[in-house]
Amino acid sequence: MMLVQTMATGLLTAAGASLILSGILRLLHRLYRRDYLASWAWSWMALCLYFSFSSTALILGKSDGRPGWAFLCSSLALIAGLAQTGWLVLGTQEITQGRPVEQSRARLLMAGLVGIGLALATLSWLAGDSGFPRTFIMESFRSLLVGIAFAVAAISLWRFTAWNHGIGRRLVSAAFLVYGLHQLQLFGLELLRLNSGVLAEYIHYIGFVEVILQFIVGLGIVIWFLEEEREGVVTASRKIEHLAFHDPLTGLPNRKLFLDRLTQELSAAPRRGTMLAIMFLDLDRFKVINDSLGHSYGDELLSNVAQRLKESVRRVDTVARLGGDEFTLLLLDLTSSEDARRVGDKVLSTLRRPFQLHGHEIFVSTSLGISVFPQDGAEAETLLKNADIAMYQAKEKGRDNLQLYSPTMSALALARLDLESDLRRALANNEFHLVFQPIYNLEAERFDGAEVLIRWRHPGRGEIQPSQFLSLSEMIGMSYELDLWVLDAACRDLRKLHGAGIEGLRVAVNLSARAFHHPDLVRQVEKICSRRELSPRWLELEITENLAMQNVDMTLSALRGLKELGAQISIDDFGIGYSSLSYLRTFPIDTLKIDQTFIRDLTADSGDSAIARAVIAMAHSLSLSVVAEGVEVPAQLEILRNERCHRIQGFLLAAPLALDDCLEFFQSHLAAEEGTQGDDEPLRPEGDHLPRRSAG
């Protein structure tokens, strides 16, 4: 009886240890939200129930008249012990696979183990007190199953933690293995008892052994999570340090780290007797991609650009992202500035290849500036500033090129900065005005339109040509505001022309990339026309061929909105773009304007002449109107008339005219047309009837 009490006390002690370990696991689960901790907490709670029911069954079994209650407790202990195995397996599998086990599979496993427990209990009841010993059925199979489960879990955890240098998980793995071997030993002792009928003395102290093993497992789990906590702190510290010196999107060094490396290399370069170069790189019209496709596409494009830049230079060189679409490169150990130019050409060529973004083929170009140590500066900030200045020179020279820094660029940069400041004040100071270039209809043989052109009358510098400020306005984000001013002024002046008797006149207005891709454009056009009491049908809005193809979906949406208002749509500078001709059938286009570069050599037997003729023929086949720009000599006019070109404009007709001159021009031609009514020959824009090219 004393041995039974000792054994029961040991089992109750083990139940208390299991309960404490289950509580620790539950607390860790609340802190770290790991699902496998919940599974293990249930596993040790089931083990607590197993020890509790086993101890109760042992005491009741030695009492007289309570065999049924003892059997019930033994059955419940068996089911709890098998359930412990199931939750252990579920938790371990989640750790090794990195994801929770499916609920259906988990429920199937637990139901199967409970079924096995009920089957063994039933078999034990049928066996009775004779024949096959009841205790062997109730205990041995459970020990065998638990022993195998813990051994497999130990091996899985050990393999999973092969690259983990901490001792916590290894200690848990070792404790699981020892516990599994312990259960297999109990199975062996039951087999020995079955054969010899001898109960090993070790069995009576099994509960105390369980307490020691539970303590080792609990200690290992606590150490495990303390190590994870420390590892998390170290990882977070490294991540913070990395973010302080690297760009979070591309992983490239940021401005701070780039300048630090540049400063170090500037100190070492004189000792090595070599040169180094700074490249400042900016993607052309990157904002259009962000605005049209979305920032997710823009971010992916920047990541792809960063990857191509790293592939374009050596491992000793540095690629950094300063922010936005600006990148810098540090090239080491150069012998001349031509080495930097060759690398720059390689970078430009690499970035010209199309990028694939979620099924979209995107083309980008790059403006690149280069400064070289020691001739362009001896300090990091100076070299970076000079490379930036050279990059802006590349943009002003048409983009998609590189420029080496020269001292004269600094003066140009200061002048550009002054011009930028003046440009921002020009709208408020009412320094802009419009001029009109007449458009002649060859079919109707009369003037029926004019293209409006913006001019800037600077109070200190005089007249500034559009080529000097339009690209700058786009760079500083003023182009949309400027386009709205041109639209408003054009509608105002056209209303005056109509009121002066020049009826049926339509004006053509160019739209910039920023304006055309602005979501509010259609509403603004409608608002301006309403304020100026002018129907939108008198507007012909022009968009360049390349701009139309930057984002086909957004372009099509904007064109349809403008067409619904009644405005006419024309493609300006047609023929110099790189787009597919299929958009001519897709977009609601009314007019094609042949670029003047093809009209200039129209009288010569050249490819330009063939292109102009082909565009006119194609426009006729698509029922589109065609306008020839830059007509300057009568021979060009005669060829265009023979090719059945619809409309023309250029200096042969008139130079761009101020509003008052334009009114006088149209009134004089209107009077001349009225004077020829009833004659056999209507007025033609040739000979003495045409105003000659004038200065200005």
Image (cartoon, rainbow, N blue to C red):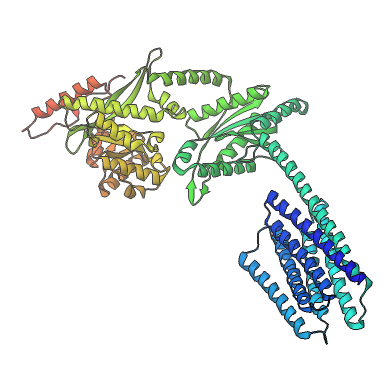
- Nearer the observer, 175 or 645: 175
Residue 547, position as x, y percentages in the image: 40, 39
- Nearer the observer, 506 or 576: 506
- Quarter holding the C terminus? top left
**Could you tell whether 564 is left or right of 332 in the image?**
left
Residue 494, position as x, y percentages in the image: 23, 27
Residue 296, position as x, y percentages in the image: 52, 44
Residue 143 vertical position relative to residue 425 in the rendered view, above or below: below
Query: Which residue shows up at 38% across the image and 25% down it?
Result: 466
User: In the current view of this chain or complex, which residue is farthest to the front?
Assistant: 65
**Could you tell whether 251 is left or right of 355 in the image?**
right
| Number of residue marks | 0
Give the image quarter of residue 34: bottom right
Q: Is residue 360 visible?
A: yes
Give the image quarter of residue 661: top left
Query: Which residue shows up at 17% across the image and 35% down it?
Result: 445
Residue 121 vertical position relative to residue 524 in the rendered view, above or below: below
Residue 415, position as x, y percentages in the image: 49, 18
Q: Is residue 690 visible?
A: no
User: In the current view of this chain or complex, which residue is farthest to the left?
Assistant: 678
Residue 76 vertical position relative to residue 325 in the rendered view, above or below: below
**Could you tell whether 597 is left or right of 336 in the image?**
left
- Quarter holding the N terminus? bottom right
- Nearer the observer, 128 or 220: 128
User: In the current view of this chain or complex, which residue is farthest to the top?
Assistant: 460
Query: Which residue shows up at 16% across the image and 24% down it?
Result: 500
Query: Which residue shows up at 76% across the image and 27% down it?
Result: 268
User: In the current view of this chain or complex, which residue is farthest to the bottom?
Assistant: 131
**Could you tell whether 7 is left or right of 19 in the image?**
right
